[in-house]
Image: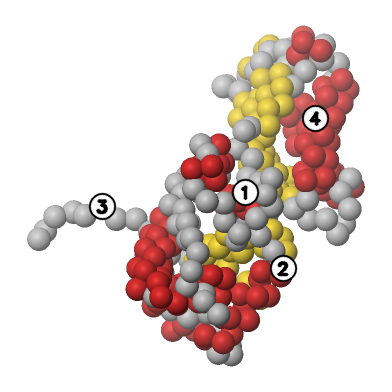
Amino acid sequence: QGKTVPAMHACAHDVHMTCWTGTARVLTDLKAQWSGTLVFIGQPAEERGAGAKAMLVDGLFEKFPVPDYCLALHVSSDQPAGTLGFTSGYAMANVDSVDITVRGVGGHGSQPQSAKDPIVLAAQIVLALQTIVSREIHPLDPAVVTVGSIHGGTKHNIIPDDVRLQLTLRSYSDEVREKLIASIRRIVKGQALAAGLKEDRFPIVNVKDEFTPAAYNDPKLVERINGVFGQWFGEGVMIERKPTMGGEDFGRYGRTERKIPIYMFRLGGVSPAVMKRSRALGQSLPSLHSAKFAPDTECIKTGITAMTAAVLELVGKK
């Protein structure tokens, strides 16, 4: 009609919700084949890592029945449509955001001896932080410390009062997570002492309240559901995926006091023809967060079928 229609792919969350709605409709039609209570969680704010926490704090499992299992799917941009991906055990990482304000004593660039340069100190801190993973964390424990942002100063000849750093931390175990945070605090303080700063100008380390816990797929549940997928889809559909250091707050449902077994499987979202052509040309496929990522709608049928099969395995009448 010649009208502009706002649209977004939403990191494939539109596909997720379509599969979610479709599964609810199919299971309603198949009510005679299962017994029990199904809770469909329409959770917002996954990308910020805050949605699951907010729903749990709001009393999700007090207002609605506590589930025996939690299931989820997520589209993958590197997996052909019609396939299902799985990771047993740790699948996605703890995610922490850390802000560091490196404080100094400002001054004129021609007289550095009269100042305490926070830019130099920030540079030393950035380099020192790189030793945490390489020298303090066990080589077999995955961990990431990335400085994603550094901002300081206003002009060529001015030594600023402060520099701001933004970090992302990734880990699987809570012990490694705590070690990363403690090491950052120690290194930052040590560098400030070495620079001769007084305590009232020590850097400020703020671990933001955006913590997303690691997603741990229960191995027994994974094995059980994968067996059902094999029966429904046949051979060649299941793809074992390596754990990633990305974050997904679905993991929080398995971290409550009830220790609910969870399983998030991956839904192939790329047309096999597109994958074949990209590989032949040596081109990379658009990532989930790319504006060019366009999920193959054929994956919707696979997603609905897979989730329906999983639910019937868990609550179906034997």
Residue at image position (60%, 51%) is: 253
Q: Position of residue 183 (x, y in %)?
A: 83, 36
How far apart marks 1 and 2 lie (CA) works out to 17 Å
Residue at image position (41%, 75%) is: 32
Depth check: 95 or 66 in front? 66
- What's the amino acid at mark 3? Pro
Residue at image position (68%, 27%) is: 206
Depth check: 10 or 120 in front? 10
Q: Which residue is mark 1?
A: 252
How far apart marks 1 and 3 lie (CA) works out to 32 Å
Q: Are marks 4 and 1 in contact (CB under 8 Å)?
A: no
- What's the amino acid at mark 2? Pro
Local SS, label 3: loop
Q: Which residue is mark 3?
A: 6
Q: Mark 4 Cα within 10 Å, few/some/many (few <14, many 20+)? A: some
How far apart marks 4 and 2 lie (CA) works out to 35 Å
Q: Which residue of the protein is positioned furthest toward the left in this rendering? A: 1
Question: Of marks 1 and 3, which one's residue comes earlier in the chain?
Answer: 3
Residue 219 disc label: 2
How far apart marks 4 and 1 lie (CA) works out to 26 Å
Q: Position of residue 175 (x, y in %)?
A: 82, 45
Q: Mark 3 Cα within 10 Å, few/some/many (few <14, many 20+)? A: few
- What's the amino acid at mark 4? Arg
Q: Position of residue 250 (x, y in %)?
A: 58, 53
Q: Mark 1 Cα within 10 Å, few/some/many (few <14, many 20+)? A: many
Question: Of marks 4 and 1, which one's residue comes earlier in the chain?
Answer: 4
In which quadrant will I find the C terminus?
bottom right
Q: Are marks 1 and 2 in contact (CB under 8 Å)?
A: no
Q: Which residue is mark 4?
A: 185
289, above or below 185, in the image: below
37, above or below 303, in the image: above
Is residue 22 visible in the rendered image? The answer is: no
